[in-house]
Image (cartoon, rainbow, N blue to C red):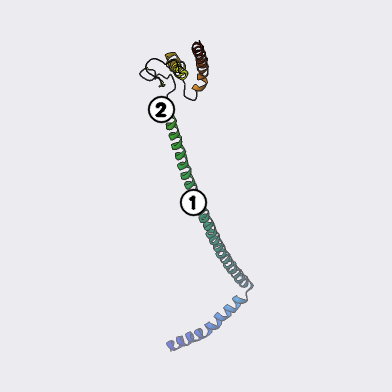
Amino acid sequence: MKSNNQSGAAGRASAASPAGTLEQHLTAWLDPAEQQKRKTENSMLNFYATQLQDAGKTIENLQEENNRLRMEDQSKANDLKERLTKLRIKNSSLIAKLELLQMRLEMAASKTHHFHSQSAPFGHVNYQGTIPQTRLHTFPGPLPVDNPLLLVNKSLSTFLTRPRFFFSINCSILESLPCLFPYVSLAVIILFFQASTYYKQKTK
């Protein structure tokens, strides 16, 4: 009997419990505090969802900006590399031109030195201390008195082969031209005097 009574009470309690739970849910749903709590939770969820979307858009924008800046940096780097290559080529060309000009200057200097060494000035004493003699056409033997040209040639050869003449002119060929003027004038005067003396003797 007791067992039957206990089972009946449990059945009645189980039948009455769903109704009590539903009533509690309805009461909680209609409660203003609960409604405000739910609204707050929903608004917070919406806010977080909006913030998440904004963060995603910001990340996308930053990625696009990063890609753009990277492309600009790559383009600038390529331009700088191209300019550096051009400057290196220009530098190499200038170095080659400078070396060519230096070579030309050295060749010109060597040619000038060779020219001055080959064309020694009149009266220039060499390293042995001897005086180079000027080769003039002279006739061996006694001078015939009936030819004035031979007399002029002999007079010039005698005058120009004097040591004093060569020691007084110690300059290059081009520089010696002004130095030769007084000697040439003196030689002309001597020749004129000798020619006049010759013709006077011949007329007698």
Where residue 97 sits: x, y (%)? 47, 41
Q: Which residue is mark 1?
A: 81
- Judged from this view, the residue extending furthest toward the left is 128
Q: Nearer the viewer, residue 180 or 159?
A: 159
Where residue 116 sits: x, y (%)? 43, 27
Where residue 83 sits: x, y (%)? 51, 50
Q: Going by the image, does 119 lie left or right of 59?
A: left
In the rendered view, tell whether residue 73 sits above or below residue 27. Answer: above
Where residue 21 sits: x, y (%)? 55, 80
Task: Locate the N terminus and report the quarter of the image it occupies.
Answer: bottom left
Query: Which label is found at residue 146?
Result: none
Q: Nearer the viewer, residue 152 or 156?
A: 152
> How many numbered circles are shown?
2
Dot placed on the residue nearer the N-terminal end, 2 or 1: 1
Distance, label 2 to label 1, CA atoms, is: 55 Å
Q: Which residue is mark 2?
A: 118
Q: Nearer the viewer, residue 93 or 45?
A: 93
Amino acid under label 2? Gln
In the rendered view, tell whether residue 151 sits above or below residue 89. Answer: above
Choose top left, top right, bottom left or bottom right for residue 59. bottom right
Q: Residues within 10 Å of mark 1 (few under 14, many from 20)?
A: few
Q: Going by the image, does 161 lie left or right of 48?
A: left
In the rendered view, tell whether residue 176 sits above or below residue 56. Answer: above
